[in-house]
Image (cartoon, rainbow, N blue to C red):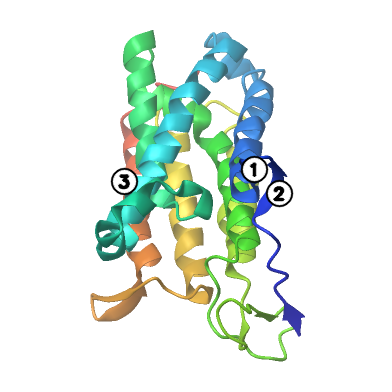
Amino acid sequence: MLIHPLPNPIALKVGPLAIHWYGLMYLLGFMMFLFFGRLRIKQPHLARAGWTGKNLDDMLFYGVAGVILGGRLGEVLFYAPAHYFSHPLEILAIWKGGMSYHGGALGVAAAAWLYGRKNGRGFLEILDLIAPLVTFGYITGRIGNFINGELPGRIADPSLPWAMIWPNIDWLPRHPSPIYQALVDGLLVAVILWIYARKPRPLGAVTACYCLLYGLGRFVTEYFRRPDYEVAFAGLTVSAGQLLSLPMIAAGLAGLVVAYRIHSKTTLR
């Protein structure tokens, strides 16, 4: 049976300066945003829209603030309010992990709105551009969770070849849920969305497609992750992550209907 290696969360230490793997994973995600973003703006329909590398650089500046502030506030408010309100100084300790994807997504949306307002770009136009790019940050973030020994999975059948013991939790075989989510909610969604977004789509359709794909993927992979907490919803017991994914699924379905019925002639040109 596999055993989680629980590597040192500090990748490099120079004097009093400690560089954590978790932070490096976020840095890698931002670098991938720029790399794949430059490939994306070369697609003919986006090149005609006048997107440039400088636009991506500026959006990243806004996006970093949105991810960090939104992700941390989401963790505090959605998952562990009692703990953080009892230990308020820990809210600032983001190097220890604890970032909510759903909070980060709201932060990125707010950042996109601010960028668009300042630069004369439409809100949905910006979201359609960056939707395929934010998936890469999600992948690296989940790898960071795994390195930190966070988000252990539910108990697994010991015969499962990749069942893993997390010594920081207990000595029971568990699903390596951060890896599941990096592959399904992250990589699989990234590939499908990249292919879908290569051609002009109705305004808002790429964003809606991302919400739908991510929401469905996250809802499924949450079955293998030990829940932060569970709630009863419509007669069923769902985890916090599943509950927060339901609005994304609904928004994705509604967004696609609106995009193809109302904005079908308003494509990214």
Residue that sits furthest to the bottom in the current view: 158
As shown in the figure, which amino acid type bears the numbered disc 2? Ala
Q: Nearer the viewer, mark 3 or mark 1?
A: 1
Disc 1 secondary structure class: strand
As shown in the figure, which amino acid type bears the numbered disc 3? Ala
Asked if residue 112 is positioned above or below residue 15 in the image, the reply reads: above
> Mark 2 or 3 closer to N-term?
2
Image position of 58 (left or right of 195): left
- Of residues 164 and 235, which is closer to you in this image? 164
- Of residues 128 and 37, which is closer to you in this image? 37
Q: Residue 100: x percent and y percent?
A: 41, 52
Q: Which mark is residue 241?
A: none
- Of residues 177 and 213, which is closer to you in this image? 177
Residue holding disc 1: 19
Separation of residues labelled 2 and 3 (CA atoms)? 43 Å
Q: Are marks 3 and 1 in contact (CB under 8 Å)?
A: no
Asked if residue 105 is positioned above or below residue 219 in the image, the reply reads: above
Q: Are marks 1 and 2 in contact (CB under 8 Å)?
A: yes
Residue holding disc 2: 11
Q: Residue 185: x percent and y percent?
A: 55, 56
